[in-house]
C-alpha cells in the first residue's frame, strides 16, 4: 500500500532558520523549498535533495531528536565528511553495518542526521 516516503519532519526552535539554512544548504548541499503560504508564517524551513525532503518545524518546547533521525544517502561520503569537519559539525562513524559506510552528525540545533553511502 505504501509507495514511498514523502518527507521527514524534524523540530527546531524559533529563530533557528538561518542556522539551519547554513547547514542544510551550505554544508549538506540541499535546496530550500518554499513552504505553502498557509504554513510559511509558522517559521521553520523545508529542504530537499534528490528524493530526500526534510521539513523542520518550530516547536515551542523544542528538544532535539537525538535517537530518531533521517538517513540521507550520499554519493560522496568522504567529501561530505570533509565539509562537515570544515564547518565544525560533529562526525561520528558508525561501524555497525559491515559493507556500508555511515556517519552521524548533528544539525546546528542538535538533531541527529545519518549520512550513508548507497547499498
Image (cartoon, grey):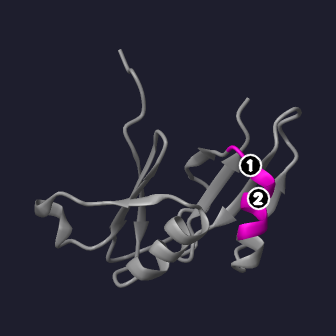
Q: Is residue 56 visible?
A: no
- Closer to us: 45 or 112: 45
Reading the image, the residue beneath label 2 is 79
x, y percent for residue 19: 48, 80
Neighbourhood count class around disc 2 (C-alpha, 10 Å): few under 14, some 14–19, many 20 upward = few
Q: Which labelled disc corresponds to residue 19?
A: none
Q: Residue at x 80, y 62 (%)?
A: 92
Q: Is residue 119 above or below residue 62?
A: above
Image quarter (top left, top right, bottom left or bottom right) of the C terminus: top right
Q: Is residue 73 above or below residue 35?
A: above
Q: Residue at x 43, y 59 (%)?
A: 31
Q: Main secondary structure of the magenta part?
A: helix
Per the model, the C-alpha gap separating discs 1 and 2 is: 6 Å
Image quarter (top left, top right, bottom left or bottom right) of the N terminus: top left
- Closer to us: 35 or 58: 35
Q: Which labelled disc corresponds to residue 76?
A: 1
Q: Contact (CB < 8 A) between labels 1 and 2?
A: yes
How many badges with numbers are in the image? 2
Q: Is residue 63 left or right of residue 82?
A: left
The magenta stretch is 75-83
Q: Is residue 102 above or below residue 36?
A: above
- Closer to us: 4 or 29: 29
Amino acid at each position: 500500500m505504501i509507495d514511498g516516503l514523502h518527507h521527514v519532519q524534524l523540530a527546531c526552535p524559533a529563530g533557528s532558520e538561518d542556522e539551519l539554512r547554513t547547514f542544510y544548504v551550505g554544508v549538506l548541499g540541499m535546496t530550500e523549498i518554499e513552504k505553502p503560504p498557509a504554513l510559511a508564517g509558522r517559521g521553520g524551513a523545508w529542504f530537499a535533495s534528490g528524493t530526500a525532503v526534510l521539513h523542520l518545524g518550530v516547536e515551542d518546547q523544542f528538544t532535539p531528536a537525538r535517537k530518531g533521525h533521517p538517513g540521507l544517502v550520499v554519493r560522496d561520503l568522504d567529501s561530505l565528511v570533509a565539509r562537515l569537519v570544515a564547518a565544525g559539525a560533529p562526525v561520528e562513524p558508525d561501524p555497525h553495518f559491515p559493507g556500508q559506510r555511515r556517519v552521524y552528525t548533528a544539525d546546528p540545533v542538535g538533531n541527529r542526521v545519518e549520512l550513508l553511502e548507497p547499498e
